[in-house]
Image (cartoon, grey):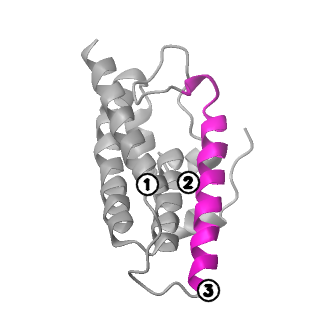
Amino acid sequence: MRDKTVGWLFVVAQAVLLIAVVLLPAAEHWSRPLWLMTVAGICVVAGIVIAAVAALGLGTALSATPVPNEVGELQTSGLFALVRHPVYSGIMLAVAGAALRSGNAVVAVVAALTIGFFPLKARWEERRLAQRYPGYQDYAASTPRFVPRPASLWRRQPAT
């Protein structure tokens, strides 16, 4: 019961941070040339796509909280072959892009807090994943948490 409560607290904290990033107004705290707006927009869209594809890739393991559910299986293929938490990676990329686009220093601070929040959430979640899935430790030892190793981007992924 305690894990579920803590898991929901993580969800609420994440929602508050994400809502703040999205709803805080734009400002002119830094120059936003077209190239920066383009890069930032690509980051937002790519981040959302990565998070959505990863969430769909979880299948029955998808859970509203960072507590592993009882019916899911450990996912190690697709985006999960590149990083252990591609949903979080996608969200962080989108948040960084949104902060760049905003031109608002307050949004940038909230975005930094949001990005800093995910390692805490991931470490907490990983302890539960290791308890739930016997192979998780080996997977975690060979797969980065959020950012893929450059070489892993070019190797052919095994068919599943």
Residue 147: percent from left, percent from top: 47, 61
Residue 116: percent from left, percent from top: 30, 56
Residue 102: percent from left, percent from top: 48, 70
| Membership of 31 in magenta stretch | no
Please give the name of the residue rendered at 51% of the width and 64% of the height, measured from the top-left corner: 98
User: Please, what is the three-letter code of the amino acid marked with disc 3?
Assistant: Trp
- Disc 1 from disc 3: Cα separation: 30 Å
Residue extent of the magenta highlight:
35-62
| Residue at mark 2 | 82
| Membership of 51 in magenta stretch | yes
- Choose the circle earlier in sequence order: 1 or 2: 2
| Residue at mark 3 | 35
User: Please, what is the three-letter code of the amino acid marked with disc 1?
Assistant: Pro
Q: Specify few, some or many for label 2: CA neighbours under 10 Å numbering under 14, 14-19, or 20 or more.
A: many
Tell whether label 2 touches label 1 (CB within 8 Å). yes
Please give the name of the residue rendered at 57% of the width and 72% of the height, measured from the top-left corner: 40
- Choose the circle earlier in sequence order: 1 or 3: 3
Please give the name of the residue rendered at 56% of the width and 68% of the height, measured from the top-left corner: 151
